[in-house]
Amino acid sequence: MMMAHILLALDAENQSRIIHETLLATHQVTAFDPAHTAPCAFDLCIVDQAQWSTVNNWLASKQHTSMPRLFAGTCDVIDNLSPDIVCHVDDVIRLPIHTNELTIRLATLLKSYELARKQASLQERLTIINTAIESTSDAINIADVNGTSVYTNAAFLNMYQYSTHDLNSGGIPKVLFVDPRIGTHIFGTVRRKGSWRGEVELRSKDGHVIQTLLFLDKIMDENNHELGYIGVCTNINHRKRIEMVQREQRVLAEALRDTASALTSTLNFDEVITRILENIGKVVPHDAANIILIEQDIAYLVRSHGYHEDHPLQRFSASQTPVNELHDLQAIRESGIPLVIPNTEHYAGLPAQHTPWLNSHIGSPIFLGGEVIGFLNVDCYQPDVFHKGHAEYMQLFVEQAGIAIQNARLHEKAQLLAAIQERQRLARDLHDAVSQTLFSASLMAESLMLLWDKRPDEMPARLKQLHLLTRGALAEMRTLLLELHPERLLRTQLDELIFQIVNAVKGQKAIDIQCHVAQVKSLPTTVRVAMYYIVQEAFNNIVKHAEASTAIVQLSQTNGQVSLLISDNGSGFDPQRAEMAGLGLDNMRERARSVGADLQISSEIGQGTKVAVNWSSNIET
């Protein structure tokens, strides 16, 4: 028997002494003193009629009325106990005390009190646990060892609408799981390994699919015997939606960045438009798409994919159709806002270019300078696929399409302007060089007729001079023709190009030009063209600025190393002076840099100029 702390409140000293001596060996016994005694320190109180009211009031004042009380009294007193005492006493013992009876009564009462206290504590814990389970937002289901549901909390009922009876009508895996095989597999895993945690799809009673984080575990007793299973379900639909939105935004950002990269890296309109259509597919899933532009109120197809060969849109690309005859496009043009048609069967404005197998449609206007210049359209086989959110995404790509179109038009204008400027330059060159040379040759031919009779000895020299003039004019014409037809420039070898430049220079000015030009093999086209323009720029400077009497041009190739040198004995210049930029030095440097060649320009006033170019075949061009 456990040792207890006994509070002794008896008036009869003799009986008090007997009880004290009887219990002292097995318990701690303290005489009652209301001034010094704390009730919580005692496990049981032995009290007689004389002390009853005092002890009862003391316990009430200390809020400890639950202490067990053993009433001690004579037979007459016990037989005539008042109802108040009977209601509050836990047991009675007759005086005079019999020690065996006292021991037995005391042990029984202490055991009963300890059991009651444990039950109260257990009930309190169960109440707390039940309150926690019922108040949690997680859905909880408890099943026995056979998988039969025995309990569901309020959150489970609110989330899935199933009672234990509903779950047991077909079994938890079949009723609750979207795929019953997954539920069966999870229960099997828990039976073997003890627990399972992961994301599953569960179906509520009204048919909604709920993305759920499930934790399923065994319930074991203190002897490690299996009692059943507890499943905790967390609704992660909101989290999944957030993850989906984040994923969509990430894909959208990557698609827009890819398209922006195309816009900044190339002026090729077809390439950019193709990239736009590809990237739209990452953000707005569809089966077919097209881009239509308007030119003078005529709609024409510039790009499409996904349409059948017999689709009217394919024939539309070869025809000229007024945009006002295409009702859906005209409606977009007039409103300036996207047209979203979740189900084309319910829309009467798509008679011409749609077929029954395209059942969902979005058309977005392409703006340029506040004017609708075209349309970006997507179609889907399934109805009720597209919504306004898709149209908002498309509008971002529509803006990029507008930028691509603007870039293409600006590039076209720039090319046209460049072509006009080039023609003007060629006209100037033709006038400045070829026309002047031919005019000089014409005058010389007329003078030769006069010299024939008067100074015939000068005829050979003058004929030679006339020959040089005409050969120079011919060389200059060939050079201009090369620039008018770049494909010829790409096909002509570098040594031949250099000779044409030299002949043209000789026809313009009386300069002694020495050529040591070897035939260069396997020279990349880009390098050949760059060196050609460097030679041309160098000789332009010799003719216009150097006042040189002699010039040398050298071209050689050794073990993959190509060397080019143009030098003259002219007036030279100071390379550090800013006004020297007009000599085309920057153009020469840029052309050399573009092919990875090394360019060195050396000059001093009065000492002539040297332009040296070195290129190695080990350099990637």
Image (cartoon, rainbow, N blue to C red):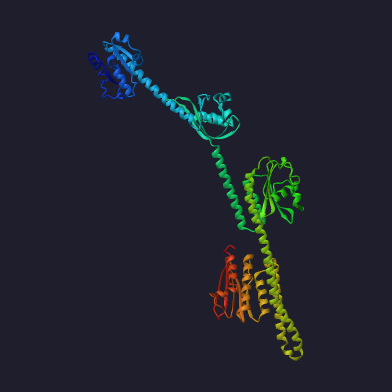
- Identify whether 71 is placed above or below 39: above
Q: Nearer the viewer, residue 590 or 609?
A: 590
Q: Is residue 188 visible?
A: no
Q: Is residue 513 visible?
A: yes
Q: Quadrant of residue 200?
A: top right
Residue 215 in picture, x, y percent from top left: 50, 33
| Residue shown at the point (22%, 13%) measured from the top left | 14
Residue 328 in picture, x, y percent from top left: 72, 47
State the quadrant of the N terminus.
top left
Q: Quadrant of residue 209?
A: top right
| Residue shown at the point (56%, 40%) measured from the top left | 241
Residue 69 in picture, x, y percent from top left: 32, 17
Q: Nearer the viewer, residue 559 or 549?
A: 549
Q: Nearer the viewer, residue 380 or 182?
A: 380
State the quadrant of the C terminus.
bottom right
Q: Is residue 425 left or right of residue 116?
A: right
Q: Is residue 83 left or right of residue 564?
A: left
- Identify whether 94 is placed above or below 33: above
